Image: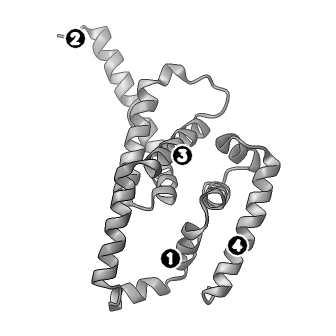
Amino acid sequence: MMSNRESSSYHDQHHLFNELIDQYGEGLMRLAYTYVKNKQAAEDVVQDVFMRAYEKRDDFKGESSYKTYLYRMTINRCYDHLRSWSFKNVQISNKLTLIFQGENNTEHTAIMKDEKFMLGKEILSLPLKYREVLVLYYYKDLSVEETATILKCSPNTIKTRLKRAREKLKLQLEKNGGL
C-alpha cells in the first residue's frame, strides 16, 4: 500500500503526464502525420514520444523550450519509423492494394477536389527536407530559429529550404492544375 506522500507524488506525476498530452498531443499528432502519412502510425509515434518524455523527464536540460524538445523527439521517432522494416512492408502492401482495387469512386473524387486536401497532398509529396520546414514554419508557427534548432541546422539553411520548398510546391500546384 502507498503512503500518503507516495500517493500524492503519483497523482502529481499522473497530472503532469495528462497536462503534456493536453498541451502538446494534437500538435505532435499533426507533426508525426506529416512524416509517416498514416494516422495509426502517427498515434504510435506520439504515444512513444510521450512515454519517453515522461520516463526521461529529469534528463531535459532546458537548452530549448519543452515544445521544441518534444518536436525534436517526435521527428526523431518518425525517422526511426520510416527506416523500419515494418513501415516499408506496409507501404508495399498499400500500393498493391491500390493497384488491385483502383481509386475510382465518387466519394474519393469529391475529396480529391477539396482545396485543402489538394494542398496537403502536394505538401506531403514534397521531399522530406522541404516538407518538414513547411510544416514547422507554416503549420506549427515556429520561427526560423526554432525550426533550425529542431532540425539541427542553421537558420540560413532553413531559409533556403523554405524558399526551395515554396518554389517546388508552386511548380507542383501549377503542374497539377493549381488550387
Q: Quadrant of residue 128?
A: bottom right
Q: Is residue 4 above or below residue 104?
A: above
Disc 2 packing (10 Å; few <14; some 14–19; many ≥20): few
Q: CA distance from mark 2 to mark 3?
A: 38 Å
- Residue pictured at 75% horizontal, 52% vertical: 158
Q: Which residue matches tag 4?
A: 168
Q: Which residue matches tag 3?
A: 75
Sequence order check: which comes first, mark 4 or mark 3?
A: 3
Q: Is residue 121 above or below residue 127?
A: below
Q: Position of residue 66 (x, y in %)?
A: 58, 34
Assign a secondary structure to mark 2: loop
Sequence order check: which comes first, mark 1 or mark 2?
A: 2
- Front position in the image: 169 or 71: 169
Q: Quadrant of the N terminus?
A: top left
Disc 3 packing (10 Å; few <14; some 14–19; many ≥20): many
Q: Position of residue 149 (x, y in %)?
A: 70, 40
Q: Quadrant of residue 71?
A: top right
Q: Is residue 90 above or below residue 29?
A: below
Instruction: Please state which amino acid type lies under the numbered disc 1.
Output: Phe
Sequence order check: which comes first, mark 4 or mark 1?
A: 1
Q: Quadrant of the C terminus?
A: bottom right
- Residue pictured at 46% horizontal, 24% vertical: 56
Looking at the image, residue 171 sits to the left or right of residue 11; the answer is right
Q: Which residue matches tag 1?
A: 117
